[in-house]
């Protein structure tokens, strides 16, 4: 079995693209911390929106779905799950809430990862929660003709517990010495976690939950307000391409994690930029109509009333609806479709 020693990363030299991402994220992190001290009370709605989006998107990547109405009810704990998908959505919601509320008390250790995985499946009839895999799994893909083929073979079950222990121990040692920037270390850890593929099911969702946990523990809280999972889901082909590009030589320890580092840093930076845009609208003291007008000017192509409510979290649903109607009457927006299929574009 390959060994894991993240201290070797300090001897690596990173290209200007990675260094640029790291520098910009550091800058946004400092700016966000200042804003949060000043406007924390006004951002609660943004947190709730991000939780729903993260729960939906991370499960959607794995083909786990329900309706928008049911999703919101499940996330608000206003209903009970009706089927297997909804049980797994509820589990993700609970683990995400645990991380949001207790990240500083959840160290990166094998037993904590197992507990989070246990809670992911707490509503499921499956008995796999909180247990490492007991059969060999494979990372597969399907070509244009519908033929399935193996992209990558993870570690066998008997090597898995020790490997997870190794990556946790090595990560913690390097974090203690502060030799490597967490923004480099976190993507490397997550890539190794996915290559180990430690569970029979739930590996992708656990990797995204662990990404959030590790970012929070290092002081990067953008995922609390802007869903990282949603950004991954919108471009999931790039996510899979970045993982595949790093897998060559992984078993021998000669792999290059650069593509996945760049991918994940780009997602984090995009989330910080969106947070900045949202904050401008939150801080805007103009009438609701002008706030919604400004929000629509930032949208390319079509958008919905729900999109505007996310962009303007401090406005009520009635204010957003009224403002959109006025903008349509003015000829600034064009309404398309009807009922649930309604969307808008700028003229």
Image (tube, rainbow, N blue to C red):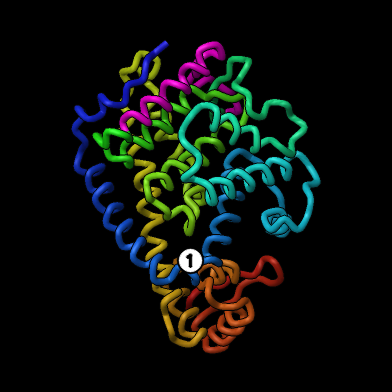
Quarter of the figure that contains the N terminus: top left
Q: How many marks?
A: 1
Which residue is labeled 1 in the image? 301
Residue at the image point whose x is 53% and y is 71% from the top? 313
The residue segment tinted magenta is 145-174
Whether 112 is among the magenta residues is no
> In the displayed structure, would residue 327 be above or below residue 110?
below
Dot 1: within a 10 Å radius of its alpha carbon, few (fewer than 14), some, or many (20 or more) residues?
Answer: few
Residue at the image point whose x is 33% and y is 30% from the top? 257
Q: Position of residue 265 (x, y in %)?
A: 35, 45
Closest to the observer, 341 or 139: 139
235 to the left or right of 182: right
Closest to the observer, 75 or 35: 35
Residue at the image point whose x is 42% and y is 30% from the top? 191
The prevailing secondary structure element of the residues shown in magenta is: helix
Q: Is residue 302 visible?
A: no
> In the displayed structure, would residue 117 be above or below residue 229?
above
Q: Position of residue 345 (x, y in %)?
A: 52, 72
Closest to the observer, 158 or 326: 158
Q: Position of residue 338 (x, y in %)?
A: 69, 72
Closest to the observer, 164 or 208: 164
Classify residue 14 by image quadrant. top left
73 to the left or right of 28: right
294 to the left or right of 30: right
């Amino acid at each position: 079995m390959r060994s894991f020693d993240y201290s070797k990363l300090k001897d690596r030299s990173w290209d200007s693209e990675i260094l640029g991402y790291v520098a910009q994220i550091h800058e946004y992190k400092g700016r966000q911390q200042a804003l949060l001290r000043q406007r924390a009370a006004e951002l609660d709605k943004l947190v709730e929106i991000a939780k729903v989006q993260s729960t939906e998107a991370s499960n959607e990547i794995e083909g786990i779905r329900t309706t928008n109405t049911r999703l919101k009810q499940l996330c608000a704990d206003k209903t009970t799950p009706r089927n297997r998908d909804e049980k797994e959505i509820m589990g993700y919601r609970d683990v995400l809430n645990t991380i949001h509320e207790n990240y500083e008390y959840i160290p990166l250790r094998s037993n904590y990862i197992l507990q989070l995985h246990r809670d992911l499946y707490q509503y499921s009839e499956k008995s796999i929660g909180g247990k490492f895999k007991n059969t060999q799994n494979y990372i597969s893909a399907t070509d244009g003709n519908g033929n399935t083929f193996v992209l990558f073979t993870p570690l066998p079950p008997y090597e898995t517990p020790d490997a997870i222990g190794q990556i946790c121990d090595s990560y913690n040692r390097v974090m203690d010495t502060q030799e490597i920037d967490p923004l480099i270390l976190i993507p490397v850890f997550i890539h190794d976690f996915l290559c180990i593929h430690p569970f029979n099911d739930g590996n992708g969702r656990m990797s995204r939950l662990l990404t959030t946990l590790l970012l929070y523990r290092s002081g990067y809280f953008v995922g609390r307000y802007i869903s990282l999972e949603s950004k991954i889901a919108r471009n999931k082909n790039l996510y899979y391409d970045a993982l595949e590009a790093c897998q060559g030589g992984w078993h021998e320890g000669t792999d290059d994690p650069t593509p996945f580092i760049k991918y994940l840093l780009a997602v984090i930076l995009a989330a910080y930029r969106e947070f900045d845009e949202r904050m401008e609208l939150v801080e805007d003291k103009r009438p609701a109509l002008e706030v919604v007008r400004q929000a629509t000017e930032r949208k390319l192509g079509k958008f919905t009333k729900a999109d505007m409510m996310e962009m303007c979290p401090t406005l009520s649903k009635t204010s957003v609806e009224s403002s959109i109607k006025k903008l349509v009457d003015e000829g600034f927006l064009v309404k398309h479709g009807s009922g649930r299929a309604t969307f808008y574009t700028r003229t």
